[in-house]
Image: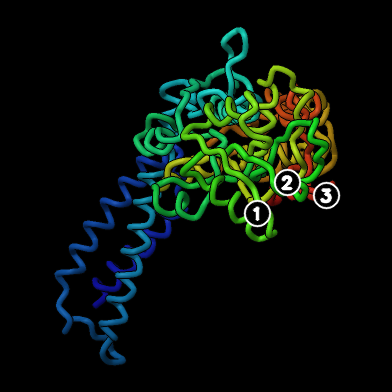
């Protein structure tokens, strides 16, 4: 019996030690392998103990209780094995290849689009750069892979890209059935309307009787029908099978109004012969939260991407910018010190250097800097912050605390 209890106790102790190991540490990875091997040996020895041996001076030991304890430890061990196998998967791959493979659009001004020099720029592009700054320490270490809507999820699932930041809407189906998971929202979008300015229309409620260019086979088409039906308004749909044809239909006067995601409308407006001749109406008739997505099953990479976004939001909230972040090293504000990795959890839990968040802010900037530079009032698109403002400013952007 003493031997049995010793075996059970040994398994318990080794399992507890195992849970405290840092699976991102090379030294601890070797320790984990050693501990797992010892536990397997002890479990085999324990299996050889006969039930009648489980007695003490006080009487019989509850064998089922002991089995339950062992089963619990096995479950814990299995969980640790899974975590060990998954942790660092994409991060290790990124570090080994020396860059982040980032899936972007085939060209959407303000979000991901090559400029005249062939350099990618936009809100989504800058988030790719932020992840590179966090993981490699250099925002330029990004390989941009343009993807169509049909290609994007397959590319992420197959590992062709490490990260998908392609003006992609976070939905229940995509988050649960495609093997991907969204790590936050870097742009709250919604379906909107663009009209010819000479119509004198300033609100979507004034669109009764107008012709509307819309792409077929999309949720955009369904939302359009719902909007007019609910308000008992009439419209004439002018349907095209691609977005390019839809834009051209509006551009050539085949309809009065065009509808798609508002972010895309701002971008398409720039492509008009006279951008000032059209306006984007303020109303949104759907919710389209756009954000970065990663593969399911790699919690470490998911956390890295998620907290990179949160870092940019926190930096704006605390007034820390790419210009001021160096001076913030002397700050006594505990929130700022935790933000830039001087105090608090730093980078260990993510498997990153302690200055990872500092590098994100220094090299890319806070959320406001990135937004204004790419799609905001400092950009050709002139998009208002609206719901994308911080919660304190009347928007809905918000990040959990860094502690």
Label 2 near label 1: C-beta < 8 Å? yes
Residue on which the image places disc 2? 207
Q: 227 and 23: which one is in front?
A: 227
Q: 48 and 398: which one is in front?
A: 398
Q: Dot 2: what SS?
A: loop
Q: Dot 1: what SS?
A: helix
Residue on which the image places disc 1? 228
Q: Dot 3: what SS?
A: loop
| Residue 134 appears anywhere in the view | no
Residue at figure coordinates x 37%, y 65% from the top left: 12
Residue on which the image places disc 3? 394
Q: Quadrant of residue 350?
A: top right
Q: 70 and 305: which one is in front?
A: 305
Residue at figure coordinates x 52%, y 28% from the top left: 245
Residue 189 percent across, percent down from the top left? 66, 43
Q: CA distance from mark 3 to mark 2?
A: 28 Å
Total label count? Answer: 3
| Residue 353 appears anywhere in the view | yes
């Amino acid at each position: 019996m003493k031997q049995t209890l010793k075996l059970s106790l040994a398994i318990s102790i080794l399992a507890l030690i195992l849970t405290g190991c840092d699976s991102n540490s090379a030294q601890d990875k070797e320790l984990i392998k050693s501990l797992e091997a010892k536990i397997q040996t002890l479990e085999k020895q324990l299996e050889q103990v006969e039930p009648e041996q489980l007695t003490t001076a006080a009487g019989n030991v509850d064998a089922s209780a002991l089995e339950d304890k062992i089963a619990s430890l096995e479950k814990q061990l299995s969980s640790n094995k899974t975590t060990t196998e998954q942790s660092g998967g994409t991060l290790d791959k990124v570090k080994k290849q020396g860059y982040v493979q980032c899936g972007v659009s085939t060209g959407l001004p303000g979000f991901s689009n090559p400029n005249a020099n062939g350099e990618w720029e936009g809100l989504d592009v800058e988030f790719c750069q932020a992840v590179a700054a966090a993981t490699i320490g250099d925002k330029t270490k990004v390989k941009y892979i343009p993807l169509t809507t049909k290609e994007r999820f397959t590319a992420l699932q197959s590992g062709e890209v490490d990260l998908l930041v392609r003006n992609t809407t976070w939905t229940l189906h995509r988050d649960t059935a495609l093997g991907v998971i969204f790590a936050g929202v870097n742009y709250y979008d919604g379906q909107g309307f663009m009209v010819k300015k000479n119509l004198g229309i300033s609100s979507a409620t004034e669109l009764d009787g107008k012709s509307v260019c819309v792409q077929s086979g999309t949720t955009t088409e369904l939302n359009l029908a719902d909007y007019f039906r609910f308000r008992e308004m009439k419209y004439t749909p002018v349907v095209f099978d691609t977005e390019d044809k839809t834009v051209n239909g509006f551009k050539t006067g085949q309809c009065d109004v065009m509808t798609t995601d508002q972010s895309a409308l701002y971008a398409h407006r720039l492509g008009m012969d006279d951008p000032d001749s059209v306006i984007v109406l303020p109303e949104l008739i759907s919710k389209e939260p756009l954000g970065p997505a990663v593969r399911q099953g790699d919690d470490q990479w998911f956390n890295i991407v998620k907290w990179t976004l949160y870092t940019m939001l926190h930096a704006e909230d605390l007034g820390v910018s790419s210009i001021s972040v160096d001076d913030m090293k002397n700050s006594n504000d505990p929130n700022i010190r935790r933000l830039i990795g001087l105090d608090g959890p730093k980078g260990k839990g993510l498997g990153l250097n302690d200055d990872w968040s500092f590098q994100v802010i220094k090299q890319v900037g806070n959320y406001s800097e990135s937004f204004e530079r790419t799609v905001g009032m400092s950009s050709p698109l002139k998009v208002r912050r609206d719901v994308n403002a911080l919660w304190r400013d009347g928007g809905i952007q918000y990040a959990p605390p860094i502690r």
